[in-house]
Amino acid sequence: MLHQRMAALACGLALGTPVAAIAQDGPLTVAMHYTQEQAAPLLACLDAYEADGVTAEYQQISYRDYLQTVLTGRLGGQSPDIYNVYSIWAAQMVDNGVLDAPPVAVSKLVSETYSAGTVDAVTIDGTVWGVPTEVSAYMLVSNMALLREAGYDAPPATWEELREIARTVTARNEQGRIETAGFAFADSSSGAGFVHPFYALLYSEGARPYSDDFSEANLDGPEAEAALERMAELVGDGITDLSVDAYDFPAGGIGMMIMANWLESEIRAGFGDSFEEDVVVSPIPAGADWRTLQYAFFMGVDSNSDRKEAAWDLVRHLNAPREDGPSCMGEMLSGLGALTANTADNAAMGEPDAFTAPYLAALEEGRAVSQPNVMQAAEIEGMMAQTFERVLAGDAEAGPALESLDGEVEDILFEFY
């Protein structure tokens, strides 16, 4: 999870049992960031699991503290058997020797069952490190009730149309504060706010944020400047400001946002009976060769586990479609509005709903580009978010700000590549 659901999970440390060293005869432990309620279908699978006397149990670690908890716990000799890892943590975990390299059968399962972009998300230096679980991509989500009220019967097909529609939708009160926003960015404290939309626009410009070997950043080029200026002009147009939060979209007062598919359940709850009619997902209108960002989580095994073979068996079990339907993970994620990018799971779950279908198409058609698995990714994206916020607030110009950012990022890359 990067978004409101994750922010809620980050409010406290792990619920339930602390992460602890696992005895040989104890249950295998699966450490994830989902709440007990969110993970209910998976918990049922874990409760029922028994293979050659091996059982399993669930441990929750808060999303915001996950990586630090893992690294600190291992220093004290305490770690679960199985992790659910956000892809941008993987490089650091691999560098610290946390993850076990999967058996050939697991790597083959991933390469044959998941879309290419998703395989990239779990790959570090050419090695697949686990089985993808939650996958999300970014698309334009429109509140058609507001767009129709403003005289538009379809989402924008070009960036200029997006600006035009958003200006028409926007309404301010007597004090000049936005009451109805034509567009909104998400809370900038997570990558979902500014960084992920920037990646999507940058990919659509035909560029990548780093060189292939991650030794250099490409954040000071014309494509990056064009992507950031597109974002900044939305604030400059007066159709949004930094006080408007896209996570409030379910309340109905925001016209459009660039958002990942995981928010579907919250949007559906907010719109109620009008969801099917009033919420439309479409490509981010960035040209015929548009691209978008996808990120992933994956299940990996701790390199210190005393039962790595049994742990990998459990990972396969939780992610393999069942005779009567999707995998345990597929069932859980479907209930959250998330995707697995597992082709067998998608087939088992049948025709996607109208909200999910465009996201799934972006993954299947190769439009979704994986989030870079670069060392210190979380630190770098935090720096990116601060720079972008200054530009959007009008406190810095895109070109000079990106040039400075590029230098700072390359100082970090120099330490590792």
Image: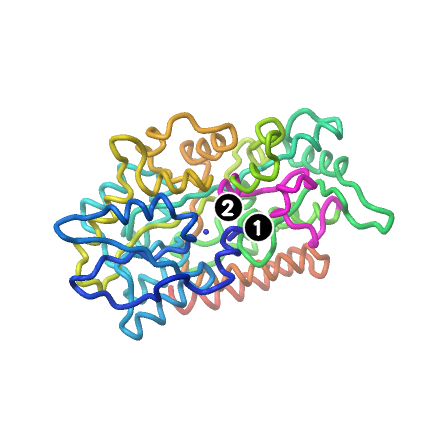
**Residue at position x 52%, y 56% in the image:** 8
Q: Which mark is residue 207?
A: 2
Do the residues bearing badges 2 and 1 touch, measured as CB atoms within 8 Å?
yes
Q: Specify the amino acid type for callout 1.
A: Ala
Q: Position of residue 311 (x, y in %)?
A: 21, 54
**Viewer-closest of 76 and 238:** 76
Where, by quadrant of the figure, is residue 302 drawn? bottom left
Where, by quadrant of the figure, is residue 119 drawn? top left
Bounds of the magenta segment: 237-264
Q: In the picture shown, does residue 393 fall above or below 281?
A: below
Q: Specify the amino acid type for callout 2.
A: Ala
Quadrant of the image for the C terminus?
bottom left
Q: Position of residue 289 (x, y in %)?
A: 52, 34
> Is residue 133 shown left or right of residue 294?
left
* Residue holding disc 1: 224
Q: Is residue 160 magenta?
A: no
**SS at circle 2:** loop
The tag earlier along the polypeptide, 2 or 1, is 2
Where, by quadrant of the figure, is residue 352 drawn? top left
